[in-house]
Amino acid sequence: MSGAKPEVATFAAGCFWGVEHIFLKHYKNKGILKTAVGYTGGKDDFKNPDYKTVCTGATDHAEAVRIEFDPEQVKYDELVEFFYRTHEPTTVNRQGADTGTQYRSAIFYHTREQLEIAKRVTEEVQKKHFDPKGEKIVTDIVPAGPWYDAEDYHQEYLFKNPTGYQCPTHRLHW
């Protein structure tokens, strides 16, 4: 670990199993120090939601991954671009066959600097990869709020269950 203080990035891009898996496959030992899958972005009156309740859509929580990273090894803007490379950010509340608010595309920023970087990278990715196809990024860029870890069996699920379900959108698109 470098001398830099670790930072946190939070992304929602569909089923959190695949999101965590692809980030760890590409960035473990290359800047990502720790990940957790969980729920964020939901209604204030739903505290400590569980998977079953989130899947009903009643809580408005997104399935998300919380990434602790070393900013001297990997920059936040690189993580934001990778987030866009590895899912379908042009569909509202859907990744592949997975539908519902918990599968929305969202960046939950933790600092003003992260907000500015997320906006800039989104504009760059839109122009380069989606304008030519006539598609529009619909990713929410919103402040990070309360975070709730998902149940233990969800953590690093696809490493523990290599043949488990993985949304087909969780791959490198460019």
Image (spheres, rainbow, N blue to C red):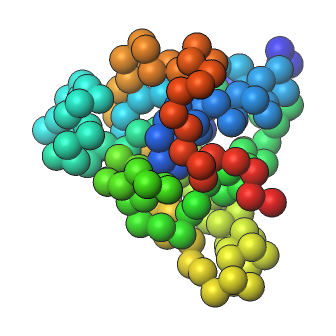
Residue located farthest toward the left when viewing the structure as drawn: 45
Residue found at x 68% / y 77%: 130
Residue 5 visible? The answer is: no
Q: Residue at x 70, y 48 (%)?
A: 171
Q: Is residue 54 left or right of residue 96?
A: left
Q: Is residue 138 left or right of residue 173?
A: left
Q: Residue 91, image x and y in percent? A: 48, 67
Q: Nearer the viewer, residue 111 or 92?
A: 92
Farthest front residue in view: 163
Instruction: Give the residue displayed 20% in from the left and 34% down from the top.
Output: 53
Position of residue 153 measured from the top left corner of the image (x, y, whole percent): 43, 14
Front position in the image: 103 or 64 = 103
Left or right, 31 with reference to 123: right
User: Where's residue 145, x and y in %?
Assistant: 37, 40
Q: Which residue sits at x=56%, y=18%? A: 161
Tally the numbered discs. Answer: 0
In this view, 34 is above or below 112 = above
Q: Going by the image, does 74 lie left or right of 111?
A: right
Q: Using the rendered image of the protein, determine whether residue 23 is visible from the camera's viewpoint.
A: yes
| Viewer-nearest residue: 74 or 36 | 36
Q: Above or below — where is 8 with respect to 1?
A: below
Give the x, y percent position of residue 131.
Answer: 69, 83
Q: Quadrant of the N terminus?
A: top right
Is residue 95 placed above or below 42 in the rendered structure?
A: below
Q: Quadrant of the C terminus?
A: bottom right
